[in-house]
Amino acid sequence: MRSIIIRIFMSLMVSTALLGQSGFYGWNQRTHSELTWYTLETEHFNIHYHNGIEEIARKGALIAEQIYPTILQQIEVEPWGKTDITFTMEDEILNGFAMPSDQIFIWVSQNDVAGHFGGSEKWLRLVLPHEFQHVAQFN
């Protein structure tokens, strides 16, 4: 009985989070249909990015593969399927978030804030391990 209650509670939590994200994009109408999207596939990741940030996506793919074995070893989880990472520099923010559905979203804005983190590569080296740890813990 307790296991059923926990599963229902977790399902409600995940559903609420997913609905909250979809509402955000619907509310501000910033889905960026004007962008052309590409996917770069690596051994453990699908890297999604739009035109204009190809170099950032390549750096992100390299960093993601570098951190992959270390994070799995530290958290003591077995490998699973591929994780999707989406990079964008629209919206002029510097942020990221992870979802239980093996998805990571990272904004790599080139505004003045990025300079405080040492530029896009240093930002990627900070945010990718952090967000991937969440995905690994979800698994």
Image (cartoon, rainbow, N blue to C red):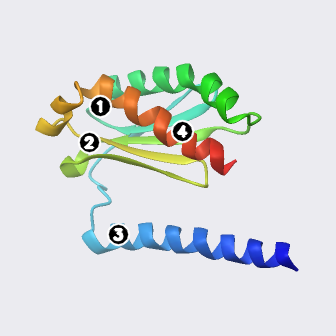
* Dot placed on the residue nearer the N-terminal end, 2 or 3: 3
Would residue 110 appear left or right of 63 to someone viewing this image? left
Mark on residue 53? 1
Would you say the residues marked 1 and 3 are in contact, meaning their CB atoms lie under 8 Å apart?
A: no
* Dot placed on the residue nearer the N-terminal end, 1 or 2: 1
Q: Residues within 10 Å of mark 2 (few under 14, many from 20)?
A: some
Q: Nearer the viewer, residue 49 or 20?
A: 20
Distance Cα–Cα, label 4 vs label 3: 23 Å
Which residue ends up furthest to the left in the rendered image?
Answer: 112
Kindly identify which residue carries mark 3. Answer: 24
Decide if residue 29 is in sight here.
yes
Q: Residues within 10 Å of mark 3 (few under 14, many from 20)?
A: few
Q: Residues within 10 Å of mark 4 (few under 14, many from 20)?
A: many
- Give the answer, above or below, for where 13 lies relative to 44: below
Residue 21, given in percent of the width and then of the height, sits at: 43, 66
Give the number of marks: 4
Tell me the amino acid under the disc marked 1: Ile
Tell me the amino acid under the disc marked 3: Phe
Would you say the residues marked 1 and 2 are in contact, meaning their CB atoms lie under 8 Å apart?
A: yes
Kindly identify which residue carries mark 2. Answer: 89
The residue tagged with tag 4: helix, strand or loop?
helix
The residue tagged with tag 2: helix, strand or loop?
loop
Q: Nearer the viewer, residue 132 or 61?
A: 132
In the image, what residue occupies the spot 59% across and 68% down? 14
Kindly identify which residue carries mark 4. Answer: 132
Camera-near label (1 vs 4) is 4
The residue tagged with tag 1: helix, strand or loop?
loop
